[in-house]
Image (cartoon, helix red, strand yellow):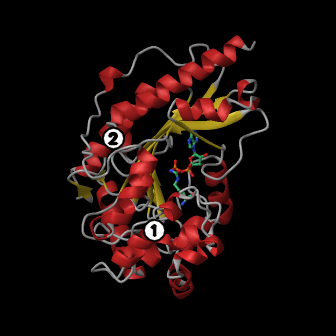
Amino acid sequence: NCQSVAAAATKPAAYAHESPFPPKMLAAKAFTRDVQDALGGLKTANGFTLCHAIASGFWNSDSGVGCYAGDEESYELFAQYFDKVIAEYHKVDAATVKHVTDFSIDKISTDSIDPEGKYIKSTRIRVGRNLAGFPFAPNQTKAQRLEIMTKIVGALETLEGDFKGTFYPLEGMNPEVQKQLIADHFLFKEGDRFLQTAGANADWPSGRGIFHTDDKKFLVWVNEEDELRIISMQEGPDVRAVFARLASAVEQIGAKLPFAMHSRYGALSSCPTNLGTAMRASVHVKLPKIGKKDWFKDKCAALGLSVRGIHGEHSEGADDGTVDLSNKRRLGVSETEAALIMYNGVKELIALEEKEQ
Ligand code: ADP
Ligand code: CIR
């Protein structure tokens, strides 16, 4: 695969019209002749190349972003490339942006976004994390992935109180249990083609799994797109409760595991869209009236929100008008600000839906 990506990638600019990269894809836009000439021959210490980085976008022409980093060094060695993607996705100056962590809850209003419980089904906030010193999901050996899992699970099993839970490895999981966990929005899906072509699904299901409390309000995905996805979720609209639980979990896990952190990009993630806070704060919200308007997606974008279907990225919304709305930017904002983008945007959309009654 990599050879054909490289062959296509090294075509002269005159052949650009033949490129399988749709020009709007962020990975394609950043893949200029200058970038190919400067970075095409480089490899990180873990053997990751620009060709590996763009493979997912190359094979999936419907990618919105289309590239992944293979390790911490990728963001340094291929900065000339990734900085363009980062700048365009997060609307920041990638050369000067500096992530400052702030999980303070007091800036989030105690007022409910949905006081009558008419619109919001559930609230979920997650952050991605990777361990310092190990390659990321697209670039791991089976042994490295297992070592990472052992370290993470060892740390998670020492958590207590509201965070005391059990790890369930994917390998050997009853298929019915797995299917139900996915359908109920707790577990990552299987066979994601964007991750598959990035190399991130290698040796599946070995080394993957999910840790969760009995009430499934606190969960950690292990070795999916990132080595950890730390998740807080519950039914209803209580953003403060979900945010507070997540903040506490991140602090406790961070005290036990050294995360891959960058002095300016904050948390390092395999996908450049997740740098910084690596936080996606979302609600499943039913907006049957305004959700059908031709201006709905543009309005969401203007409010800084991404729209996803109810089974996650690249899925469709539900027939009853329920969609997943979340903060788009994760870098250039603090954790509190990322949650507030979601809170304020959703509040405004609910007010618009009310007006349509
Ligand atoms: P991620 O959020 O980790 O980037 P996805 O968009 O694929 O990944 O979502 C992962 C899972 O979380 C999906 O099953 C999705 O339906 C579920 N999910 C996301 N937001 C919510 C929410 N607010 N309430 C319930 N489930 C949610
Ligand atoms: C894509 O390019 O569509 C996938 N590789 C996923 C990109 C990350 N999604 C996002 O918009 N945050």
Q: Quadrant of residue 134?
A: bottom left
Q: Are marks 2 and 1 in contact (CB under 8 Å)?
A: no
Residue 249 point in image, percent of width and height: 33, 43
> Mark 2 to mark 1: distance in Å?
25 Å
Q: Residues within 10 Å of mark 1 (few under 14, many from 20)?
A: few
The amino acid beneath tag 2 is Gly
Closest to the observer: 2 or 35?
35
Q: Which image quarter holds the C terminus? A: top right
Q: What numbered label is drawn on residue 32? A: 1
Q: Residues within 10 Å of mark 2 (few under 14, many from 20)?
A: many
* Drawn side of residue 213 relative to residue 192, left or right: left
Q: How many marks?
A: 2
Check mark 2 vs ligand 2: CB closer than 8 Å? yes or no: no
SS at mark 1? Answer: loop
The amino acid beneath tag 1 is Thr
SS at mark 2? Answer: loop
Residue pictured at 56% horizontal, 73% vertical: 197
Residue pictured at 50% horizontal, 61% vertical: 29
Q: Visible in this render: residue 237?
A: no
* Drawn side of residue 131 relative to residue 20, left or right: left
Q: Quadrant of residue 160?
A: top left
Relative to residue 273, is residue 284 depicted above or below?
Answer: above
Q: What numbered label is drawn on residue 332? A: 2
* Drawn side of residue 318 relative to residue 282, left or right: right
